[in-house]
Amino acid sequence: MANFQGHALPGSFFLLFGFWWAVKCVLKHYSRKLNKKNNLHRSFDKLEVIEGAVKVTFATIGILAEQFVPDGPHLYLYTREPWSWVKMMNWQHSTMYLFFGLSGVMDVLTYSPARLPLGLDRLMLAIAVFIEGFLFYFHVHNRPMLDQHIHTLLLTAIFGGSISILLEVFLRDNVILELFRSSLTILQGSWFWQVGHPWIDVLGLGCLW
């Protein structure tokens, strides 16, 4: 959605996950220090499964919001009258949500009885964040200069986060990388809200900001 709500929704998701990852990272770090065998408590595995389920839920909400808003594509990708693509921006946002949803599915499979190899969850998350950045890179073509500039600044946090998460595939439970991921996710969330700021005037909500 090319409006304030369309930016505030993913921004809220990123802020929530960023702060949660920061808290979880600190708790896991001190849990490892207190446990001589360096084994995490089983409750952390349950939290990972819950986190994955929440991620899938948020992604589903995002996709439904993008598709079924009054001016959304309503699952139509192409129309014959006239011959044209339908709301490509909404489809781009839906694609972003889809891959974050797949990341949530991978989280659940990694920490559930299926026990997929550790690292696949981080790999899928890194891919999801990279695809987010890839879509945003081509998202601003033929857009106003201000819109291009504020979205381009966001790419720094997105691609930085993708690289950081990819490193976590090989450097598991590294507190520095985890905190770096949390920080960049919080930056993304706050920046999404700020990117949506110009739309407040369009909506006539400037007095509320």
Image (spheres, helix red, strand yellow):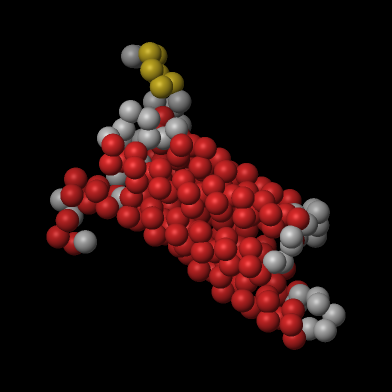
The residue lying at 80 percent from left, 53 percent from top is 116
Name the spot of residue 157 as percent of width and height, x first.
Answer: 49, 52
- Please determine whether, in this image, residue 55 is positioned above or below residue 78: below
Name the spot of residue 83 as percent of width and height, x first.
Answer: 38, 13
The residue lying at 40 percent from left, 43 percent from top is 152
Q: Is residue 102 left or right of residue 77?
A: right
Outermost residue toward the right in this view: 37
- Please determine whether, in this image, residue 204 is positioned above or below residue 208: above
The residue lying at 69 percent from left, 57 percent from top is 168
The residue lying at 34 percent from left, 42 percent from top is 149
- Please determine whether, in this image, residue 113 is positioned above or below residue 85: below
Let me know if residue 70 appears in the view: no
Let me know if residue 71 appears in the view: yes
Name the spot of residue 200 as percent of width and height, x first.
Answer: 22, 51
Name the spot of residue 12 as percent of width and height, x first.
Answer: 42, 59
Quadrant assignment, res 130: top right
Q: Nearer the viewer, residue 125 or 161?
A: 161
Quarter containing the N terminus = top left
Q: Is residue 194 left or right of residue 36?
A: left
The image shows a total of numbered marks equal to 0
Q: Nearer the viewer, residue 118 or 78?
A: 118
Quadrant assignment, res 20: bottom right
Quarter containing the C terminus = bottom left
Quadrant assignment, res 143: top left
